[in-house]
Amino acid sequence: MGRWIVSAHAKDIVGKDGHFAETAPGRGGMDYTAYLRNVTALPQAVPLMLEHLSTPEAYDEARQFMIRKAAELQIPLG
């Protein structure tokens, strides 16, 4: 399916009362090592978006997490 993917969303999930709740990247159980490696291995560049966060600070925290994780994996963003 890779050639049909045109954008990616960075989200995370946590268990809550037997259900899942969306949270900022890095606050849940998502394997962002695998996620970033697979997104950046696509045959075309795709935007990686953050969404559904409640404050500017939450967006900044999520953005910083993604930058740190990509740097740790030596994956260039841009």
Image: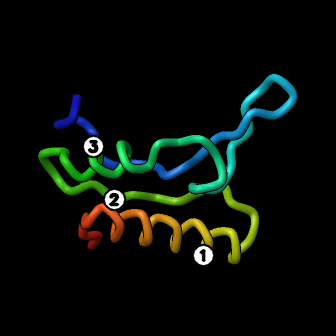
Q: Measuring 72% from the left and 31% from the top, which residue is drawn there?
A: 20
The three-letter amino acid code for the residue at tag 2 is Pro
Q: Which residue is labeled 1 in the image?
A: 60
Q: Measuring 12% from the left and 46% from the top, which residue is drawn there?
A: 43
Calculate the distance from the C-alpha at mark 2 to the C-alpha at mark 3: 13 Å
Give the left or right position of residue 24, taking residue 20 as reference.
left
The image position of residue 67, as x and y in percent, is 42, 71
Q: Looking at the rendered structure, which numbered label has been put on residue 11? A: none
**Which numbered disc flags the more N-terminal residue, 2 or 3?**
3
The three-letter amino acid code for the residue at tag 1 is Asp
Which of the image's four quarters has the C terminus? bottom left
Calculate the distance from the C-alpha at mark 2 to the C-alpha at mark 1: 17 Å
In the rendered structure, are the residues bearing label 2 and label 1 in contact, judged by CB atoms less than 8 Å apart?
no
Q: Which residue is labeled 2 in the image?
A: 47
* Depth order, front residue of 35/54: 35
Dot 2 lies on which element?
A: loop
Q: Which residue is labeled 3 in the image?
A: 38
Dot 3 lies on which element?
A: helix
The image position of residue 66, as x and y in percent, is 46, 64
User: Within 10 Å of the Cα at label 3, are there few (<14), some (14-19), or many (20+) other Cα atoms?
Assistant: few
* Residue 7 vertical placement versus 19 (above, below): below
**Which numbered disc flags the more N-terminal residue, 3 or 1?**
3
